[in-house]
Every structure is written in structure tokens, then in C-alpha cells.
Image: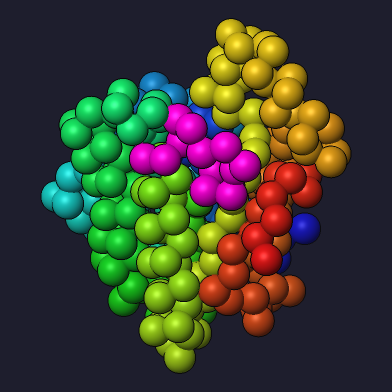
Amino acid sequence: MADLDGKVALVTGAGQGVGQGIAYALAERGAKVAVTGRTLEKLEHSCEEIRRRGGEALAVVCEVKSRESLENCVQRVVDEYGGINILVNNAQEVPLGTLEQVSDEAFEAGWQSGPQATMRLMKMCYPYLKGDGCIINLASSAAKRWDMTGYGCYAATKEAIRSLTRAAACEWGPDNIRTNVILPHAKSPGLVWWIENCPDEAAEFISTIPMQRVGECEEDIGRFVASLCTEDSRYVNGQSIALDGGQAYLG
């Protein structure tokens, strides 16, 4: 299926985990993918896999906390591919810990790499997205946890992204730009590390997922994102969609 032929996608944090899975799925549907992140070696690995499968990809080193780096990234993609049709804001530093444990520096890094980077990149890409654009931002169901202990700062940054997503959907809908947010559970390197190092807590967590498993980065998360960027989803806008096997209730 190549229903994203001719589309250009920019995916942040695509050197591993969820971002990588999304990049693979978008390329599988025919999009040219700009794979961005901080580590060139990881980006090149993602690009090599996309090319091995017959797709087209471009590695762009980018630090999302830097406005200049974001501007250079967008310009590089536009220069290479002529525009941007799909934006996926995935990269973020995660400020985990209790309120007393999370330092000002860690919370600031979470804010800069999360909501601030998301807003900046949406605004930078806006001129190119007008007409047929699709934005997918990443949030978390952490704010819906029955026990928020240790997740308050992380959830705060992710809830801000949900608010920005809704605003963009309303303000840019007339420009035919659709903006949605996903809240995934997926086997990112961080989650795999947590499962291996905190087996009891992880088992308890997985037991609360109706489907009794954590999602796969490409098959469960990436492919849904790709479908959300196609014409089949052209009337879906401003939504928060939990990709978590049924765990969170967003009503």
C-alpha cells in the first residue's frame, strides 16, 4: 500500500523506539521520511533500514531544545524534499520522579524538549503544511493514572502538548491541517529497560492493560499513525487517541 506517495514526513526522535517505528511505517506507505534526532549513528541505522525496504529517508541531526537547530532541520528537509506534509513530534526528555526528586533542570528540559519544541516545530512547519498537512503529537496517559506518584512532572509536560494539539486543530483546521495526539504504550528502549529492571512493577502495570501486552513500536503504533495521515482519516482532527490496549479511559 503506497497511499502516502509524494508526501514528505518529518519525524523527531526517530533513531529508536516509537519514533523509529513511526518512521518505518510512514516509509512503508510511500512517504519520504526525514529521520531526526541527536545521534547520527542511530539516525543512519533507521535510514538504512528504510532504504533496505525500498523507501527513501534522510538523516538530520537535530536538538529539539534549540530553536536554531529546529530551524536548520526544517530548512534542510525543505531544501532536500521541497516541502513537509506530515510532522510527528515524538522526541522528548522525560522528567520522571516524585515532585521532590525532579530538579528544576530536569523539569525545564522536559518542558523545552516537549511542549516548547512541539509548538516551535508546528509553527515552523505551518507554511508547508497548509493545504494538506497532518500533525501527530505524542502525549501520555500518565495523567490518567490512578496513582500519579512519580509521574506528575512528566504528565504535566504531556498534558501541555495535548492542549497545544487541540489549539492547532481548531486554529489551523480552516487551512486543511489536521492535528491529533496519540498516547501510546510501546516497547521503547526506556520501557524495555524498566520492564527488565522493575519486573514486579512492570507485571502489575501490564496486568492493568486489557490486552495484557505492551504495543510494538512499528506494528501497533507506527502503522496506526501512518493510517491517520492518509485520506481515509481526513476528517479526524483535534483528537487524543490512546494506543494502549484499552488501559486508559479518556472520556
Is 77 left, or right, of 184 in this rendering?
left
State the quadrant of the N terminus.
bottom right
Image quadrant where one finds the C terminus: bottom right
Q: In this view, which residue lies farthest toward the right?
A: 211
Give x and y (percent) for residue 9.
48, 57
Relative to 181, 110 lies left or right: left
x, y (%) of residue 123?
Answer: 28, 68
Residue 109 versus residue 37: which sits nearer the camera? 109
| Residue drawn at 45 percent across, 91 percent down | 174
Left or right position of 81 against 226 = left
- Range drawn in magenta: 140-153
Foreground residue among 138 and 204: 204
Quadrant for residue 165, please give it: bottom left
Of residue 81 and residue 171, the one placed in the foreground of this image is 171
The answer to whether residue 134 is visible is: no
Give the image location of residue 112, x and y in percent: 24, 46
The count of marks equals 0
At horizontal 58% and vertical 24% (from top left) the residue drawn is 191
What residue occupies the far bottom of the structure in this picture? 174
**Can you say whether 118 is above or below 56 in the image?**
below
Residue depicted at 83% across the width and 32% down the height: 212
Question: Residue 178 location, x and y as percent?
Answer: 52, 75
Q: Is residue 229 above or below residue 96?
A: below
Magenta stretch encompasses residue 142: yes
Residue 67 visible? The answer is: yes
